[in-house]
């Protein structure tokens, strides 16, 4: 028996090593492909435009002196202070509203018994399949009639009303994993349902809330569709909408008036500035993110 | 008994309070617009005022059947779905299995693969416009360095090619997310099953195809449904990479709806809404098909 086992392992030991080395090499290549555009953006943010337009060799280190003024120049081409303020307001209020209301709705679906619960929950899940573009025209009309165009409201209010099917689902799945014994104990101690939500549910769904918070943040910070449609007044623009004005391809620039007006260095520094907070948050919170997705996204 | 009856009633009223905002939202911001979509889809509305609105029956759908741009957009959207199902889910599955088998630096790779997912699509789109530029882009520069030439009009300017490039960038951004879903699924599989298969002398390939993947089936179905819905509704990336052009060649159904009904110059609201209706039916059909295929597959495996 023992010799058999040893034979077995030794017979595929060396091909196994080889295979592992090959897999490792592939993973490294893919990792480089994943991260390269980002590294290039951060290094390009510090280069002069002339260098960027001449450079065809891959060079991830900007030449001395580093062109720090790109950041200031780019920031002042348009009213990016205003864009940043708009983005922060929209992101913060959407996140607070989304977390509060999605967790309450999720609590309702997970714990309380009421008529039509399953049906309503299926309806909520069904809405995940409807892309926002499908209802875009009637919704636009509705917001227009409400006088909400060029305000933050179309981008915030939906998050205060249920927060979106995905977040409800994520949080409900997580709440289902909390033992109901805890609820019962609290009930015996005289807790009302709102008390249970406050003292039992909320303190126990931290990872799921963190995961939902990250998704909510990413959505509001990066969203293009909403601002593109509802915000036509430049004063209400978000960072993403503002950066869209740099979407002029080199080919277009070459056709109409030349490459001289193609401000790639400004775009790269703006991109670096707006993505830095996102990357920092991702790196800091990724453990919560993983555990949130693992425990809630799947089991159910 | 009395206590439970009382709390049951209390539940109902309190649940109403909890669910009310969401219920209000779904009624006014989703169900009503959805009904609006159904109505407007059968009109010739051009969005100036309701006075000009006329019901035209199936005229929009007849028009659609003869609209080559619509068919082109539909073809591109289906290419998107198929490309993502094969490659995004495929690559994600391969790396989920490899990284879960516990090689060195697995956590690092996992984090790096996910990074593009957190980036704004505006940034990704414009960044890749530059990286893929035929004269100045780094991709073509690399190709030239080894004596090859990129496509003459650029990766994004060549008509039959640009859709595939956009799909590639979409996969680049999203496969990390799919991989996370699958890793989560893998972690839920009892280790003992894989261990015993390994002790029975199963090769890693057999282990993956005979043990791991069948056990992962439910999560794979969820991942496939999410992936294909995402692929069907892709907008930001196409809009920032190519804008649907040149000459509608990389248009998807959603960007075409935007062009017709919401872009600055276009006001064909009725027609755009009719296309949105068709899109809804396609997405629901697609999801139903995937779930029922999964159920059929389950029967085949267990019987």
Image (cartoon, coloured by chain):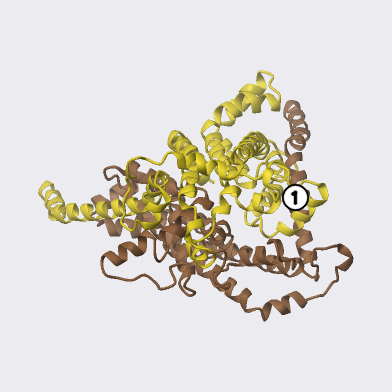
Q: Which residue matches tag 1?
A: B29
Which of the two residues, B293 or B171, is positioned nearer the viewer here?
B171
Q: How many marks?
A: 1
Query: Seen in the image, is B187 located left or right of residue A146?
Result: left
Residue B50 image offset from top left, x and y in percent: 86, 63
- Residue drawn at 19 percent across, 54 percent down: A16
Q: Residue at x 44, y 33 (%)?
A: A284
Foreground: B76 or B87? B76
Q: Mark 1 Cα within 10 Å, few/some/many (few <14, many 20+)? A: some
Q: Which chain is yellow?
A: A
Q: Residue furthest left?
A: A3
Q: Which chain is home to disc 1?
A: B
Residue A111 percent coordinates (x, y): 65, 35
Residue drawn where x is 34% and y is 50% of the image:
A31
Instruction: Give the residue displayed 67% in from the left and 47% down from the top.
Output: A234
Image colour for chain B is brown
The x and y percentages for residue B99 are 33, 48
- The front one of B199 and A35 is A35
- The answer to whether one can see residue B85 in this image is no
Above or below B77: residue B23:
above
**Quadrant of res B12:** top right
Question: Dividing the picture into quarters, in which one does residue B5 lie?
Answer: top right
Q: In the image, residue B232 lies at what x, y percent?
A: 57, 63
Label 1, secondary structure: give it.
helix
A109 relative to A13 in the view: left or right: right
Q: Is residue A181 above or below residue B231?
A: above
In this view, which residue lies farthest toward the right?
Answer: B51
Q: Residue furthest top?
A: A189
Q: Is residue B224 visible?
A: yes
């Amino acid at each position: 028996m023992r010799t058999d086992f040893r034979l077995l392992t030794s017979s595929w030991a060396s091909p196994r090593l080889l295979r592992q080395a090959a897999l490792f090499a592939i993973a490294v290549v893919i990792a480089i492909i994943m991260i390269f555009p980002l590294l290039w953006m951060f290094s390009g943010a510090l280069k002069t435009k002339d260098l960027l337009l001449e450079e065809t060799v891959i060079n991830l280190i900007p030449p001395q002196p580093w062109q720090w003024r790109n950041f200031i120049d780019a920031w002042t081409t348009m009213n990016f202070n205003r864009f940043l303020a708009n983005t922060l307001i929209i992101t913060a209020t959407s996140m607070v509203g989304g977390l509060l209301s999605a967790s309450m709705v999720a609590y309702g679906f997970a714990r309380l018994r009421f008529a039509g619960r399953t049906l309503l929950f299926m309806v909520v899940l069904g809405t995940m399949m409807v892309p926002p573009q499908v209802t875009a025209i009637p919704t636009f009309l509705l917001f227009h009639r409400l006088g909400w165009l060029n305000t933050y409201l179309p981008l915030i209010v939906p998050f205060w009303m249920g927060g979106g099917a995905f977040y409800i689902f994520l949080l409900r799945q997580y709440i289902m994993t909390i033992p109901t014994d805890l609820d019962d104990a609290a009930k015996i101690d005289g807790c009302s349902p709102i008390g249970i939500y406050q003292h039992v549910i909320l303190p126990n769904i931290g990872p799921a809330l963190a995961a939902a918070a990250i998704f909510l943040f990413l959505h509001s910070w990066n969203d293009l569709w909403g601002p593109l449609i509802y915000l036509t007044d430049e004063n209400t623009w978000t960072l993403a909408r503002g950066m869209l004005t740099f979407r002029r391809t080199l080919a277009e620039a070459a056709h109409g008036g030349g490459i001289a007006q193609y401000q790639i260095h400004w775009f790269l520094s703006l991109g670096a500035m707006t993505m830095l907070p996102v990357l920092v948050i991702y790196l800091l919170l990724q453990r919560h993110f993983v555990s949130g997705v693992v425990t809630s996204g799947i089991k159910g | 008994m009395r206590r439970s009856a009382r709390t049951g009633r209390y539940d109902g009223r309190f649940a109403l309070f909890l669910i009310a905002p969401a219920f209000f939202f779904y009624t006014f911001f989703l169900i009503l617009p959805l009904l609006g979509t159904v109505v407007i889809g059968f009109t010739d509305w051009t969005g100036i005022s309701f006075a000009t609105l006329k019901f035209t029956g199936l005229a929009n759908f007849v028009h659609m059947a003869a609209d080559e741009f619509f068919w082109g957009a539909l073809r591109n959207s289906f290419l998107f779905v198929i490309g993502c199902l094969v490659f995004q889910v495929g690559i994600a599955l391969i790396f989920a299995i490899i990284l879960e088998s516990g090689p060195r630096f697995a956590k690092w790779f996992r984090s790096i693969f996910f990074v593009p997912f957190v980036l704004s699509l505006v940034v990704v789109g414009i960044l890749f416009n530059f990286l893929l530029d035929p004269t100045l882009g780094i991709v073509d520069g690399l190709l030239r360095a080894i004596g090859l030439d990129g496509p003459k009009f650029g990766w994004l300017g060549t008509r039959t090619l640009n859709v595939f490039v956009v799909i590639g960038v979409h996969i680049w951004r999203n496969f990390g997310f799919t991989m996370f879903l699958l890793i989560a699924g893998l972690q839920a599989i009892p280790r003992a099953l894989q261990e015993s298969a390994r002790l029975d002398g199963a090769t890693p390939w057999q282990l993956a195809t005979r043990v791991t993947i069948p056990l992962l089936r439910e999560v794979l179905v969820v991942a496939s449904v999410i992936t294909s819905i995402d692929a069907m509704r892709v907008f930001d990336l196409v809009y920032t990479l190519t804008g649907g052009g040149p000459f509608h060649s990389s248009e998807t159904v959603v960007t075409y709806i935007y062009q017709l009904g919401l872009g600055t110059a276009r006001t064909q609201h009725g027609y755009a809404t009719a296309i949105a209706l068709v899109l809804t039916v396609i997405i629901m059909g697609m999801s139903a098909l995937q779930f029922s295929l999964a159920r059929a597959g389950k029967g085949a495996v267990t019987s």
